[in-house]
Amino acid sequence: MWRLGFFFHEMAFGLLSIFLPLYIVSIGGSLVHIGIMSATALVLAIPASFFWGYLCDKTRHYKRYILISFLSSTIILFFFTISTAIGFLIMLYAVMSIFHVAHEAPKNVLIAEFYTRKEWEKAFAFYEGFTETGWLIGLLLGFFISIYGICPTFTLLLCSGLNLVAFTVSLILVTDPLLIFERSLVNIEKAVGFTHKGMIVATKILDGLPLDVKLKKENHYAFFAGLVLFSLATSMLFTPLPVFFSHCLAFSASVVFVIYALNSAAGVVGYFLAGSKLNIGAEKSAVSKIVIFRSMLALSLISLAWMPAYTLTLSTLILVLMGFAYALFLVFTLSLSMELMPQGKTGLFNVLVGLGGAGGSFVGPFLAETCGFTMVFVVSSLIFLLASVAFKIFA
């Protein structure tokens, strides 16, 4: 039940994710403004993620930072309603990003400490599937709001109110774990397992027996590089994509919300399947394949220009498959990251994702504005391929 507050929080940001880029354009902004807003927010979120992650592990209090995140989002989204000045909105969004990430590291720790390592995939999958359902409902709210032409001020107040509900529910339901030891046990088990494999290899060499055990230590830096590259490609592709659908393909705002709702629904399915399909260790080989699949999907967006009669069908299909693939990727990499990142550096996952996202959220709209969307699709596809190579080296 402690996840319920996150459900309402994701509902608000699901609605905001499509509404805000379209809103910025509607009040005279451009793709470059959207890129600057997203990039600035993500750059500021990078040190903030590390800071909140360090702080929650240092104090061993997690609930308070979740509450800070939800309450600050409530207040700042309310201030969004007092002005339509683009510079002011960019500043507010940047400030909100600093406090918004405060709940990410504590949430990951709560899942890792409330469950054993064998249950991490299922626990992360359930959390992501549950909160993605909230995101999906937020997108559906955006669809109805666009259909009925409800004013932007009401939409922003609704997002603020949903975060207030998230704060209130979390205040009641979220509790800090009494004992914090599961991640330490996992690190000990990994060290013992690696030592055991080393002894087997040494014994077989001394006895002149053939080796059937590979002694290979995980390349943490390759994993970190893969996260950054994947986030870079994803942000580069998805930041300007709502504008591509609404302006280049002439889809109405309601249609854009429906496409993203189906993308989110596919993600929900992916999350609930992710925890039950692979054993521990199998996710390492799966991650690289998932990223290659995302690369192919990004490149396939070029085909929308060749078959104008099927743009809606193809757009929907591609985003549905992307949502499903992303769900699997996130569950597997979150589980792996909780093994690789020691206590005190829990926020490193969000730092790496934010680092790639910051670059992509500016480069994507800039490329779209200057070179066209075809260049965005090609470059993001190539970066996905580089990410798959990094994850292959890690595995």
Image (cartoon, grey):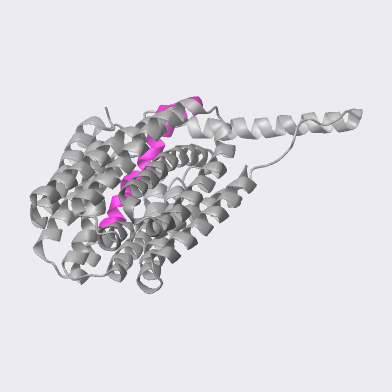
Task: Residue at 22% x, 70% y: name it.
Answer: 29
Q: Residue at x 54, y 30 (%)?
A: 185
Horizontal and vertical percent for residue 330? Answer: 44, 41
**Residue 114 highlighted magenta (yes or no):** yes
Principal secondary structure, stretch drawn in magenta: helix
103 within the magenta span: yes
Q: Residue furthest bottom?
A: 370
Of residue 185 and residue 36, the one placed in the foreground of this image is 36
Query: Measuring 66% from the left and 30% from the top, which residue is drawn there?
Result: 193
Q: Quadrant of residue 39?
A: bottom left
From this viewpoint, which residue is outermost toward the right? 208
Q: Nearer the viewer, residue 273 or 95?
A: 273
Left/right of residue 240 with respect to residue 153 in the rendered view: right
User: Which one is nearer the viewer's eye here, 37 or 45?
Assistant: 37
Residue 68 visible in the shown view = no
Number of marks present in the image shown: 0
Image coordinates of residue 374 in percent, x first then y, are 42, 64
x and y percentages locating residue 303 in the rendered image: 42, 55
The N terminus, quarter of image: top left
Magenta segment, which residues? 96-120
Residue 142 in view (yes/no): yes
Q: Is residue 387 left or right of residue 13?
A: right
Residue 268's x, y, as percent? 34, 35
Q: Residue at x 21, y 64 (%)?
A: 24
Q: Looking at the rendering, in which quadrant would you find the C terminus?
A: top right
Q: Is residue 244 depicted above or below 293 in this figure?
A: below
